[in-house]
Every structure is written in structure tokens, then in C-alpha cells.
Image (cartoon, helix red, strand yellow):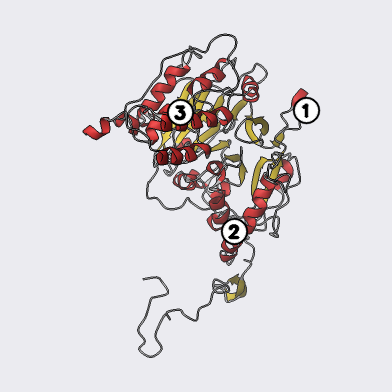
């Protein structure tokens, strides 16, 4: 390292502190305590594993565990047998695993869950890359994940059901991309979005007394905001005749009504399924069922968690004896613990956030090697403690959560975390005093983008995906019987019949266009074939 990099006691200016404080208060997963500042610990003292300060070396720029995985998943290779899911198998793919802001190696949070058996595409019956799982679900879709979905050959038609844990941008911002480009990418059906109901938090500067801040309002205003975008693509087909009403088999808690004026079977129909975040199936009630498909065997329930503002939820997915829990962002709370205990049956995969302690976050953000000192440094670190106390689970808190879960999950996965050799080493040191039976790589791992889990009754197999960095779009399947686009004109088919075709010129003003051929000189500007 060069000499300047070894500096460890540089003072933080007020300007730096205020800038970083703003980042912290924006919802970053950092801190060291899980109680309020006006409370005192009682009972058994928390174990002290000793502070761990990672060195600012190459170790912070790599994640050896992921790099050295020997099981390779290649979703773009036709002969990869792992593409196909058998009946009773579940696949969990991590498309985004990072807190904001994103880093190059990790996008913001999203996981994709699929269940078997695999359904071949009728137009390509012998190529599994065109097929799909019997049922599939997107859980959260933060910034940057659309690129990973595309690289993994996950078509938009397989991403029609999105479950949001809460409405922070790092968990739903790529909803814009998935919605707008879905119909053009082969999703000729509505986009369904599950998520929490309004928070019910009083506005301290009323009016209004309460904000309409639930999933239905998000979808309604998103549909309005994206009108120019969706209309501009509506010279292309966005629906087909064979869609029907598959949602009748989904056991929904409310009628699936689009928020705009789009036909209910159209690719631009945006359909919110708003969930009462207060419900958790108390006393055996079914008031927290979000999805229950007897045909595919998938049931999804929800429960409240504690994160920033009322209205954050976690999800439990059950499928033919397999169970996955995704908590989203939360500080330690017993709803996630009870869900993971699962009536003393345990769960197969437990996915929970984990955050950095405040001092580590601070010196990593400032590119120091060690914590600094001084009034401004203290202000920044204390701000971060406030964030963690209200919203997140740092190392030791994560370990404590695991100490409360018995029987333990077959595999616990920490996510929403800056995965690297040094941060993981510090995390394990804090977790072990709470969870002595933790076996790294066996019952506990830290997620990384493009990590894949294949879950069966007998085994949970970990893979890393190999995908092209400069690949094109996923393989698109055509359901046939496409409906006439919204903007159309008369054309002629190959047999000379008059037919309705999309009109790409209906919405533009062409009076300033460079003409294809100059009528005087006959010089061509371009050719119809693009060359």
C-alpha cells in the first residue's frame, strides 16, 4: 500500500460528516445496538467477541467463498441439466444482495424463486432454455437487478408476480424497468405486484392526516408516471387471446383490478395486491395468505417486521414440504423468529438481512483503514447507530436472532450486505458466540449476486452462475394469437390478405426526418435492411 493509504486517524470534516450522515439516514443497514438509547440491557450480558476492524487491503475487494464455488450453473447453455426443475424441487436465485448505494459486484435486493416441474416451451420442446418453472416469483426488485435477470436468461414472462417487502427504492426501483419493458420482452400478460397496505403513520405536518403510502398508491402513480413510455411502445402487441384468468387459482386476498385503464389481460395492466401488514395468521387464521395455488402447490403468507416505518413485511413460501422465508429488511423481532421456528418444524432456507457495525461502515465509506476520532466522527457514528436501532440487524443481532430459532433452518442466508472476505470474517466472529453450532458454508452463508440454491428434501446444493457479461436479451417465447396493438394501421400479410398491423409512425412527427432517399440526387441516407 502507498503511505497515504495507511493513515488511520484522519479527522472528519463537518462537511464530510453531514454528507455521510445523510447517507446513513437514507436507510443504510449499519449500527451496533438493537435497543433504544433510553433503554438498558437486563439479564445475561451480551457476549463480547472483541471488535473486528478489517484491513483496507485486497481482501475487501474479493469474496473468495463465492469465487471458489465448484458447482457451476449455466442458464444460457442448452445442455446444462440444472436448468430443468423436477417435481418437488425449488430453486432460489439471488439477483441482488446489496444495501444502497450499489457496488459494481452487487446490485440491490432481489431474489427469484421457482418450483418444478419444468414446463417445456411448445415451440422449442427440446431446449430447456425456452421453458419455465411451474410457478415463479420475484421477491423485491432493487436498482440494477434487471441486468442480472437478463444475464440469467430469466424472461419477462417468468417475472409476472412480484412480492415487495416494503417500498424503499433499493427494494422496488427496478419495478419501472420490469413493467415498462415486459410486453416488448415477451410478457403478454399483466404484472401483478403484492405489497403492504398504507402505514397508518400520522403525518406530523398535516394535512393530510395520513399519507396514502401503500402498494396500491405506488402502482397507481407509477402507472400514471409511465404513460408516455408505455404509449410509445404500444404499436407492438401487448396481449394475446389465450391468457384467460389464471389468477382465479391463486387464492388472492382481493380482486385483481388494474390501477389504470388498461384491459385486465394486457401486458401494461399493473395490478396491485395490497396486503394488510398488521396480519400474521394469529390463532390459525388465514388473514395473512397472499397466494395459495393448489395447482402448483405454492402457498405464500406474510408477517410484519420492524423497519424504518410501519408497513414492512416478510414472506414465507411453502411448496410440497419445502419452506423458504425472506424477511426483507428488519431489526430483530419475534415474527421472523416464529416464522422460522415454523411450529417446531423448522424451515429449509431462512433469508435475513445483516448489517455492518457503525464504525466499520464509517471507515469503509471514508476509505480509511481504521476508525477515526473527534466530535464529527462521533456525530456520524451515532447517527448510524440510530438507523440500526430503528431498522436493521448488525452482526451480533443477527447471531442473537439465530440463537432464538430452534430447530435451526437447514440453511441460513445473510443478505443486504457488503459481501467480502474481510466483512464476512468479522461477521462470523460476532455471530459464533450466539450460534456456536454455526458451520460456515454448511448451515450459514452470505449471499452474493448470481448465487443459486437448488433445494430438495434431501439436499440444498449451492451454485454460482456463469453468465455472459455482454450477452443479449433472454430467449423470448411467443404465445401466439397476439392481439392487435393499440396503435395500428392496415397492412398486407404474406398471402396478400388485408390485416391490422402495428403503426410505428402513429405517434411521431416526421417533418424533420432525413429522408431515406433524396428525390433529386437519389443519394440514399440508409437502407431498409439497416445496412
Can residue 33 be seen at all in this image of the molecule? yes
Reading the image, the residue beneath label 1 is 285
Of badges 2 and 3, nearer the viewer stands: 3
- In the image, which disc is placed on residue 214? none
Q: Quadrant of residue 521?
A: bottom left
The kind of secondary structure element at disc 1 is: loop
Label 2, residues with CA under 10 Å away: few <14, some 14-19, many ≥20: few
Left or right: 390 with respect to 204? left
Query: Relative to the observer, which residue lies in front, 459 or 5?
Result: 5
Whichever of labels 2 and 3 marks the residue nearer the N terminus, that label is 2
Can residue 419 be seen at all in this image of the molecule? no
**Residue 125 percent across, percent down from the top left:** 53, 47
**Placement of 260 over or under 27, stated as above or below:** below
Whichever of labels 3 and 1 marks the residue nearer the N terminus, that label is 1
Mark-to-mark CA distance, 3 and 1: 40 Å
Q: Residue at x 41, y 15 (%)?
A: 50
Pointer 3 with pointer 1, Cβ within 8 A: no
Of badges 2 and 1, nearer the viewer stands: 2
Query: Relative to the observer, which residue lies in front, 125 or 232?
Result: 232
Label 1, residues with CA under 10 Å away: few <14, some 14-19, many ≥20: few
Q: Residue furthest bottom?
A: 520
Label 3, residues with CA under 10 Å away: few <14, some 14-19, many ≥20: many
Q: Residue at x 72, y 44 (%)?
A: 210
- In the image, which disc is placed on residue 358? 3
The kind of secondary structure element at disc 2 is: loop
Q: Residue at x 64, y 58 (%)?
A: 224
Reading the image, the residue beneath label 2 is 226
**Residue 491 percent across, percent down from the top left:** 58, 75
Amino acid at each position: 500500500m502507498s503511505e497515504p493509504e495507511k493513515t488511520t486517524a484522519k479527522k472528519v470534516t463537518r462537511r464530510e460528516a453531514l454528507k455521510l450522515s445523510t447517507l446513513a439516514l437514507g436507510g443504510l443497514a449499519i449500527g451496533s445496538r438493537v435497543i433504544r438509547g433510553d433503554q438498558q440491557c437486563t439479564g445475561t450480558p451480551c457476549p463480547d467477541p472483541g471488535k473486528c476492524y478489517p484491513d483496507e487491503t485486497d481482501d475487501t475487494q474479493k469474496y473468495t467463498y463465492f469465487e471458489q464455488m465448484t458447482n457451476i450453473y449455466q442458464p444460457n447453455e442448452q445442455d446444462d441439466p440444472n436448468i430443468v426443475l423436477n417435481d418437488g424441487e425449488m430453486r432460489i436465485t439471488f439477483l441482488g444482495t446489496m444495501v444502497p448505494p450499489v457496488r459494481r459486484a452487487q446490485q440491490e435486493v432481489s431474489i427469484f424463486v421457482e418450483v418444478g416441474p419444468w414446463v417445456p416451451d411448445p415451440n422449442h420442446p427440446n431446449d430447456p432454455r425456452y421453458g419455465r418453472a411451474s410457478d415463479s416469483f420475484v421477491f423485491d426488485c432493487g436498482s440494477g437487478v434487471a441486468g442480472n435477470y437478463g444475464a440469467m436468461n430469466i424472461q419477462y414472462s417468468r417475472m409476472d408476480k412480484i412480492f415487495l417487502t416494503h417500498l424503499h427504492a433499493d427494494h422496488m426501483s427496478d419495478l419501472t424497468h420490469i413493467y415498462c419493458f415486459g410486453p416488448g420482452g415477451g410478457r403478454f400478460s399483466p404484472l401483478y405486484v403484492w405489497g403492504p397496505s398504507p402505514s397508518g403513520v400520522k403525518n406530523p405536518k398535516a394535512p393530510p392526516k395520513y399519507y396514502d403510502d401503500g402498494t396500491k398508491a405506488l402502482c397507481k402513480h407509477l402507472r400514471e408516471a409511465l404513460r408516455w413510455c408505455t404509449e410509445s411502445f404500444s404499436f407492438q402487441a401487448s396481449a394475446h387471446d389465450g391468457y384467460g384468468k389464471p389468477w382465479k387459482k391463486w387464492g388472492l386476498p382481493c380482486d385483481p383490478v388494474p390501477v389504470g385503464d388498461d384491459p385486465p389481460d394486457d401486458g401494461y395492466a399493473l395490478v396491485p395486491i395490497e396486503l394488510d401488514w398488521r396480519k400474521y395468521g394469529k390463532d390459525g387464521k388465514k388473514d395473512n395468505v397472499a397466494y395459495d395455488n393448489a395447482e402448483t402447490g405454492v402457498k405464500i403468507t406474510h408477517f410484519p417486521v420492524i423497519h424504518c416505518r410501519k408497513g414492512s413485511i416478510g414472506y414465507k413460501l411453502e411448496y410440497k414440504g419445502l419452506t423458504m422465508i425472506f424477511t426483507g429488511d428488519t431489526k430483530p423481532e419475534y415474527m421472523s423468529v416464529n416464522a422460522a421456528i415454523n411450529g417446531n418444524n423448522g424451515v429449509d432456507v431462512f433469508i435475513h438481512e445483516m448489517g455492518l457495525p457503525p464504525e466499520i461502515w464509517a471507515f469503509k465509506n471514508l476509505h480509511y483503514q481504521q476508525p477515526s476520532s473527534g466530535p464529527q466522527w462521533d456525530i456520524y457514528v451515532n447517527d448510524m447507530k440510530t438507523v440500526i436501532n430503528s431498522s436493521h440487524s448488525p452482526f451480533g443481532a443477527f447471531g442473537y436472532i439465530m440463537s432464538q430459532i430452534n430447530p435451526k433452518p437447514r440453511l441460513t442466508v445473510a443478505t443486504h450486505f457488503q459481501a467480502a472476505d474481510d466483512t464476512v470474517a468479522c461477521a462470523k466472529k460476532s455471530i459464533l458466540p450466539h450460534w456456536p453450532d454455526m458451520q460456515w458454508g454448511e448451515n450459514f452463508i452470505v449471499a452474493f449476486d448470481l448465487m443459486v440454491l437448488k433445494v430438495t428434501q434431501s439436499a440444498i446444493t449451492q451454485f454460482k452462475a456463469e453468465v455472459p457479461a455482454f450477452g443479449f436479451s433472454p430467449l423470448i417465447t411467443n404465445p401466439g394469437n397476439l392481439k392487435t396493438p393499440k396503435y395500428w394501421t392496415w397492412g398486407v400479410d404474406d398471402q396478400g390478405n388485408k390485416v391490422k398491423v402495428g403503426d410505428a409512425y402513429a405517434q411521431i412527427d416526421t417533418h424533420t426526418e432525413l429522408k431515406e432517399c433524396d428525390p433529386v440526387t437519389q443519394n440514399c441516407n440508409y437502407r431498409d435492411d439497416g445496412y
